Image (cartoon, rainbow, N blue to C red):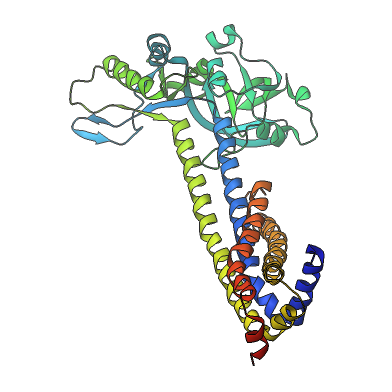
Amino acid sequence: MDLLSTFRIALRALRVNKLRSALTMLGIIIGVAAVIAMIAVGAGAQSRVEEQIKSLGANVMIVTPGTTTSSGVRLGTGAVQTLTEDDARAIALEVPEIHTAAPLIRGSGQIVAGNANWASPIYGVTNDYFEVRDWTLATGRWFEPAELASSGKVAVIGQTVARQLFGEDTPPEAIVDQVIRVRKVPLTVVGVLDRKGQSAMGQDQDDVVFVPLSTSRTRLFGITYGKLRRVHSVMIKVHVGADMKAAEDKIRELMRQRHRLQAGQEDDFTTRNLTELLQAQEASSRAMTYLLAAIASVSLLVGGIGIMNIMLVSVTERTREIGLRMAVGARGRDILSQFLVEAVTLSCIGGIIGVVLGVATAEMVGQSAGWRTEIDTRAVVLAFGFAALIGVFFGFYPARKAARLEPIEALRYE
């Protein structure tokens, strides 16, 4: 008996009990759909984290003010600005692993252009900051040395600010050389940044205005950062391939020396490895994806057990049919292949329906919950292949039992 004839007989046998066949496939359908949907959600989360790592910049660390004690009173983290521009310069010069160190002053204010206005974060930076963040320009130029040194009235703006102040239809090239008022100070836009998207905390990174560090200190934020050249934080880029932990330890040692901290005295700064934090988040997302897929795979095993159960019932019900087939010349391997093909057919049909349901579920979850989902072709193939293997594995024992029946005993079965 050829395979095509065996497949036709299997389909005919399954059509006889449509409801039972449908219920038998249900476990496979749910299992395949769950595996595909869970992997799609997990893959979307991983891609999101990878984008955040890319938007942050490679090998990035940040130094921020830590806790300090004043007159016996311990102040919270960042209560006093303990970092300076000179700290950033020393880190860049004295720590071999460091590629660039960029001081940063951060504030906020109302941005006005013509009749439009928009509240946005305002950062005072040097051009090194954009190098640390791997941030490129959509159009325009960076700050010139003279502007950085003499508190130039210039600004580089993000895509969100450009859109809010000048409208969706205004091309970036037309925004360059426009004048905006930042905290009532007129500034000329010299550059518009490329899009960065959301940060790991969900913040719109494109909703930002950058001005020269000296401009932020003398024209926008005033005496707060004063003659001591205080800064809010220092963004650091480590050389590719350098040991991040070693760089972090050297920065801590250098900063303690510069801030004249005694042995046993608490650091008045905090160093954080942002890339490692996001990579840990990516690893957690990947582990959660595997866990969810493993849990969903249990449904496939349950579906396989259901197939075995139904096939055993089918063998019992069709014992006389098996005896008749053997009596007219069917061999044991013909009976084996017939029941095995029935089991695999159940699994494959259930797998196909499960694939369609899983893709639809992933899309529905993405749209309704606002989560990013990515359908992985490998996951679809793996889930369907696993479903077919389950049909073979759990269908083999009932098929083997049917093939080993004695023709005379089968014909006598009531």
State which quarter of the image contains the N terminus: bottom right
Q: Position of residue 372 (x, y in %)?
A: 63, 48
Question: Which residue is drawn at the image coordinates 55% and 60% (left, top)?
Answer: 297
Q: Position of residue 9 (x, y in %)?
A: 78, 73
Q: Position of residue 202 (x, y in %)?
A: 55, 43
State which quarter of the image contains the C terminus: bottom right
**Count of marks placed on residues:** 0
Q: Position of residue 250 (x, y in %)?
A: 33, 18
Q: Is residue 317 visible?
A: no
Q: Nearer the viewer, residue 188 or 284?
A: 284
Give the residue at the far top of this rendering: 146
Q: Is residue 362 visible?
A: yes
Give the residue at the far bottom of this rendering: 414
Q: Nearer the viewer, residue 173 or 184?
A: 173
Q: Quadrant of residue 71?
A: top left
Q: Is residue 112 left or right of residue 172?
A: left
Q: Nearer the viewer, residue 92 or 366?
A: 366
Q: Quadrant of residue 204?
A: top right
Q: Nearer the viewer, residue 197 or 327?
A: 327
Q: Is residue 364 above or below residue 164?
A: below
Q: Is residue 78 left or right of residue 174?
A: left
Q: Quadrant of residue 141?
A: top right
